């Protein structure tokens, strides 16, 4: 159990310290007089709910942002990095929560962007870069071809490239902002081994994650932010899960995620023999059939590459080469995504940055862009209806934004995800497809997402929910489909599902790690 008052670690082992850092944006204070210690050669965990200021603090350390007040002390000497290159010169690197890659360049070119291996500073040594990239990817146990275009990689593979990009730098301090949000369990274990190797060479890690159990496994020190303020710091050995949750959200969510039993209606969505061919032969989806009832939450579990996202994309009409038949409310589904949204389907995509949001638009515009036709009053948009609907979504989903006209990029990752959910709900769907909706979201926000799914199900909607988190899928789903290699390998009712059974079913066709 956690000690009543965790002890403080002496500051003489601190390599980098943020001292009384404040960051003020128009209309909001992101950081308020925050002290944060990074201990030498340790994993320094930073936690807090979405909007607590974690990513803002990391951007200040990485030179992306500058503090309104306060200072950074590296080895006791004040530094003031004005950009990421200056931070790198001080030995500070960062893996961003939102992927920072060029989709039109290949893997090796992304890894060495702005740090190219050149001949005389003019000609890029592509072969040398590809060999080094191959070595870094081998360290991460990923057989990704360095010449593969990043846009052709799934989001989990892109996350691996982002990690390799950071490892290519000669850093003393490495910031990892949600590095495992898109990784499978086996990939997480590999990353943890890499972190241990980095620690052994004296590298200090700053580690942000909403997966609290993995923080208990990997962390040495923990600092908690809430509403832009530091509320606690302690050695990880002296804290436990309830201690962490209580200081993050002010309550214990351990009893959450158990939906009450409820009745289901008629079949609302049915699919028969959905097949998606793979370039070069074989199938990404291999004759998949399923049904979804009104008021039911159907969970889909599987390893990366199992075909979960591709299934959702086929339901939404995103793959013209797919075959099979699907019916919504007894009517056969036809056409592409806009028609299927009109028929009552909506998708919350796995990658909110590329597929869920437009970064150049405001919070309100992102919410409305899939449902604008609902707000026409004759030839004109009803500003009153728009304002009321946006305000309702902000209140219902507890989105932290001072003004809905602010750019979506000004929000934290978790609040951006809530805007994607709001955009989906404003289309008034009959079936909602939720692809990893809790990726990069804190425990409090997860509870809110689960409540949204349950409330929609109680209203008679059908909900399909993809998650790589076993506890999540078992807690939220009424029924679970397990996929592997593009096929459904097993189906479980809630009462019959166990973690072991789900893992075994997901490994069919794979070598067990």
Image (cartoon, rainbow, N blue to C red):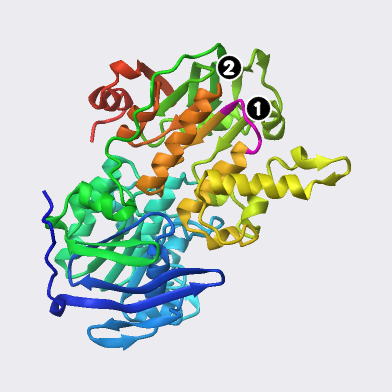
Q: Nearer the viewer, residue 143 or 497?
A: 497
Q: Is residue 3 above or below residue 22?
A: above
Mark 2 lies on residue: 268
Q: Position of residue 221 (x, y in %)?
A: 19, 62
At which x and y percent is residue 441? Answer: 41, 48
Describe residue 248's horizontal placement relative to residue 354 as left or right: left
Q: Which span of residues is magenta-colored?
A: 426-431
Q: Position of residue 188 (x, y in %)?
A: 28, 47
The image quadrant that residue 220 belongs to is bottom left
Q: Relative to residue 214, is residue 335 drawn left or right?
A: right
Element type at marker 1?
loop
Q: Nearer the viewer, residue 5 or 380?
A: 5
The kind of secondary structure the magenta stretch mainly shows is: loop
Residue projecting furthest to the right: 379
Distance between the alpha carbons at the discs numbered 2 and 1: 10 Å
> What label sits on residue 344 in the rendered view?
1
Residue 7 in view of the camera: yes
The relative height of residue 201 versus residue 260 in the rendered view (above or below) is below
Crowding near pointer 1: few (<14 within 10 Å), some, many (20+)?
Answer: some
The residue at the point 18 percent across, 72 percent down is 40
Expressed as whole percent of the image width and height from the top left, the position of residue 269 reads: 57, 18
Q: Tell me which residue sits at (38%, 69%) in the image.
A: 57
């Amino acid at each position: 159990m956690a000690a009543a008052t965790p002890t403080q670690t002496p500051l003489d082992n601190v390599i980098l310290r943020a001292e009384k850092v404040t960051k003020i944006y128009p209309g909001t204070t992101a950081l308020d007089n925050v002290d944060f210690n990074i201990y030498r050669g340790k994993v320094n965990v930073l936690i807090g709910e979405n909007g607590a200021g974690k990513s803002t603090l990391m951007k200040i350390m990485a030179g992306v942002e500058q503090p309104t007040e306060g200072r950074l002390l590296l080895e006791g000497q004040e530094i003031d990095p004005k950009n990421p290159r200056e931070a790198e010169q001080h030995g500070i690197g960062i893996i961003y929560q939102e992927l920072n890659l060029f989709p039109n360049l290949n893997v090796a070119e992304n890894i060495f962007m702005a740090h190219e291996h050149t001949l005389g500073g003019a000609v890029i040594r592509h072969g040398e870069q590809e060999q080094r990239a191959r070595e870094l990817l081998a360290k991460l146990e990923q057989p990704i071809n360095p010449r593969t275009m990043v846009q052709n990689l799934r989001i989990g593979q892109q996350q691996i490239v982002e990690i390799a990009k950071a490892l290519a730098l000669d850093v003393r301090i490495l910031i990892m902002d949600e590095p495992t949000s898109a990784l499978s369990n086996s990939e997480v274990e590999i990353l943890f081994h890499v972190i241990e190797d980095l620690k052994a060479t004296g590298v200090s890690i700053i580690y942000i994650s909403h997966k609290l159990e993995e923080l208990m496994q990997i962390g040495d020190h923990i600092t908690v932010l809430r509403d832009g303020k530091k509320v606690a710091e302690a050695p990880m050995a002296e804290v436990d899960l309830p201690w962490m949750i209580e200081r993050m959200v002010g309550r214990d969510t351990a009893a959450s995620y158990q939906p009450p039993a409820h009745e289901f209606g008629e079949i609302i969505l049915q699919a028969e023999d959905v097949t998606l061919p793979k370039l070069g032969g074989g199938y990404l989806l291999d004759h998949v059939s399923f049904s979804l009832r009104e008021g039911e939450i159907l969970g889909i579990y599987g390893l990366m590459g199992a075909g979960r996202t591709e299934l959702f994309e086929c339901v939404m009409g995103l793959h013209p080469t797919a075959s099979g038949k699907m019916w919504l409310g007894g009517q056969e589904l036809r056409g592409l995504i806009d028609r299927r949204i009109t028929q009552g389907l909506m998708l919350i995509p796995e990658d909110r940055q590329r597929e869920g949001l437009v970064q150049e638009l405001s919070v309100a515009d992102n919410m409305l862009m899939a449902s604008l036709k609902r707000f026409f009053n004759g030839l004109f948009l009803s500003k009153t209806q728009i304002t009321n609907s946006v305000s309702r979504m902000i209140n219902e989903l507890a989105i932290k934004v001072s003004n809905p006209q602010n750019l979506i990029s000004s929000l934290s990752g978790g609040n951006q995800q809530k805007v994607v959910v709001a955009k989906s709900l404003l289309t008034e769907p009959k079936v909602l497809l939720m692809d990893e909706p809790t990726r990069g979201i804190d425990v409090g926000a997860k509870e809110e997402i689960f409540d949204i799914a349950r409330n929609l199900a109680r209203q008679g909607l059908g909900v399909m929910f993809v998650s790589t988190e076993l506890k999540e899928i078992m807690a939220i789903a009424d029924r679970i489909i397990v996929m592997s290699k593009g096929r459904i390998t097993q189906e479980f009712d809630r009462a019959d599902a166990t973690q072991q059974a789900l893992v075994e079913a997901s490994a069919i066709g794979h070598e067990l790690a």
